[in-house]
Image (spheres, rainbow, N blue to C red):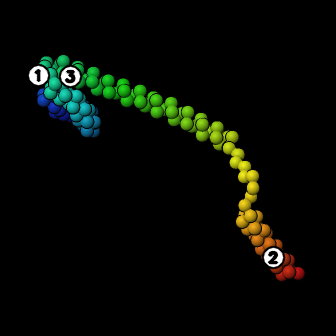
Amino acid sequence: MPDVMITIGGREFEVGCQPGEEHFLRSAAKLLDNEASVLVGQIGRMPETRMLLMAGLMLADKAAALEDQLRTAEERAIVAERVATDARAHPERIEVPVIPDIVTDTLAEIAARAEALADRVEERRA
């Protein structure tokens, strides 16, 4: 089990972790150190147990706020998915009261070409 030296609030600690988890330990220690550094900067020197407790509580408060935000985002995603599913099940119908002349002219031209091609195919068969 590797031992890793970490610094929290200006104090060094030796902590053991599972092999390959050193990076995660250092990342977690950095988060805790950031909170402890704020405390030390505001309050000054304090017993390490109190510093660690307060820094841990500050991190827990941030984690709780993030969990609330995540829960809210998940609820919004569920509602959005329901709306999207309902929209696919009941698509909005759009009616155009008047078809523009260019559309009917173009369709008539396409139909005439299709008929001319059909006539040529029939002539070649015969």
Amino acid found under the numbered disc labelled 3? Leu
Whether pointer 3 and pointer 2 mark residues with C-beta atoms closer than 8 Å, the reply is no
Q: CA distance from mark 3 to mark 1?
A: 12 Å
Question: Which callout, 3 or 2, points at the residue further toward the start of the chain?
Answer: 3
Secondary structure found at label 3 = helix
Residue at the disc numbered 2: 116
Looking at the image, residue 114 lies above or below residue 82: below
- Please tell me whether mark 2 or mark 1 is closer to you in this view: 2
> From what the image shows, is residue 10 above or below residue 50?
below
Is 95 situated left or right of 83 in this image? right
Disc sitting over residue 45 in the figure: 1
Q: Whole-Å distance between the Cαs marked 2 and 1?
A: 95 Å
In the rendering, which numbered label is found on residue 52? 3
Q: Position of residue 1 (x, y in %)?
A: 23, 32
Give the residue drawn at x 79%, y 76%: 117
Residue type at mark 2? Ala
Report the amino acid beneath label 1. Answer: Arg
Q: Identify the element where label 1 is drawn.
A: loop
The reply to whether callout 3 and callout 1 are in contact (CB within 8 Å) is no
Q: Badge 1, how many Cα within 10 Å: few under 14, some, many 20+?
A: few
- Observer-nearest residue: 29 or 74? 74
Q: Earlier in the sequence, mark 3 or mark 1?
A: 1
Q: Nearer the viewer, mark 3 or mark 1?
A: 1
- x and y, in percent, of residue 66 in the image: 37, 30
Looking at this view, name the residue that lies furthest to the right: 126
Q: Quadrant of residue 63?
A: top left
Quadrant in the picture for the C terminus: bottom right
The CA span between labels 3 and 2 is 87 Å
Q: Measured along the vertical axis of the image, is residue 93 above or below residue 36? A: below
Q: Is residue 16 visible?
A: no
Residue at 18% across, 21% down: 51
